[in-house]
Image (cartoon, rainbow, N blue to C red):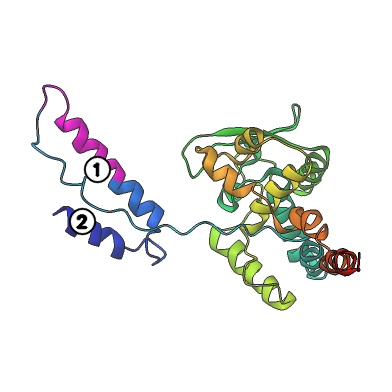
Amino acid sequence: MARSFRAFLVNKRDEDGKKLSPATVNQKLRALRTAFNWAMAGDRRYVKNNVFASIKPLPVDQMIVRAMTVEEMAQLFEHADSDGERGKAFARYMKFLLYTGCRRTEAVKLMWGDVDFNNGMVTFGKTKTHVGRVVPLSKQALVMLAEMFKENIRRDMHVQVFPYRKGYVTDLFIKYKHKMGLPPRVKLHSLRHTAAMIMRMSGVGTLDIRDVLGHKDLKSTEVYAKAFPDLLRPATETIDVDKLLEVGKVKRRKLELPS
């Protein structure tokens, strides 16, 4: 039964028709393994053995960091500026993702009542981890949100800040991406990776980045904030192969000189 349930999870599809990720399957199996351990502990002895102890987890690939380069961001926002009112609104949405590092669905679910203009804070109550968090807003983000609020006809605290559906923002980003010829690694979620990269490049510590992004596990943040290609450039630029070979030739000549 344990093996059958594992197979069921592997083939199960969500509401969008997508299969569960290996990490999600492993999470569910881990929860069952923990439950059986509890049932065996102490004087309970509800079960004799843990049938999930021998069920192997699925292999999980290391997450690829998809931070965007400065050139890619400029190209993306230039295209948004040329797309009229739709592009202007979507550019604000994308900038908000960069300002706060929030997930795309967290921004879509955000209501005006979640924005504290007096204290410069935004509260994300509906999150992936089901744990709310409060994120301070930069001056630029506050100005942008204030302009949006003034332009909004319905200034109701229960109105969406960004009147989008989850699927719409993803589809529109894909259209922009294809028109701009951006590489496959660039996705809407890349803006969250990029926010982490910007914070790291500004000297923000991993613990603070974790709190801003709302990760439960510090390991997730370490993946987001690990060395990005552009950050490694100074290290690789120190390698001058031609110069080293020239030094080697000079030293070799000295060794070959007659005594």
**To which residue does mark 1 refer?**
32
Q: Nearer the viewer, residue 110 or 135?
A: 135
Q: Residue drawn at (46%, 59%), measured in percent from left and top?
A: 61
Q: Do the residues labelled 1 and 2 touch (CB within 8 Å)?
A: yes
Q: Which amino acid does label 1 sit on?
A: Leu
Q: Where is residue 142 in the image (x, y as percent from the top left)?
A: 79, 39
How packed mark 1 is, by other alpha carbons closer than 10 Å (few <14, some 14-19, many 20 or more), is some
Q: Residue furthest front?
A: 259
Q: Residue drawn at (18%, 57%), measured in percent from left and top?
A: 3
**To which residue does mark 2 refer?**
5
Q: Which of 229 and 104 is in front in this view?
A: 229
Q: In this view, does 104 lie to the left or right of 246?
A: left
Name the image quarter holding residue 5. bottom left
State which quarter of the image contains the N terminus.
Answer: bottom left
Name the image quarter holding residue 138. top right
Range of residues picked out in magenta:
30-44
Give the answer, above or below, for where 145 lies relative to 163. above
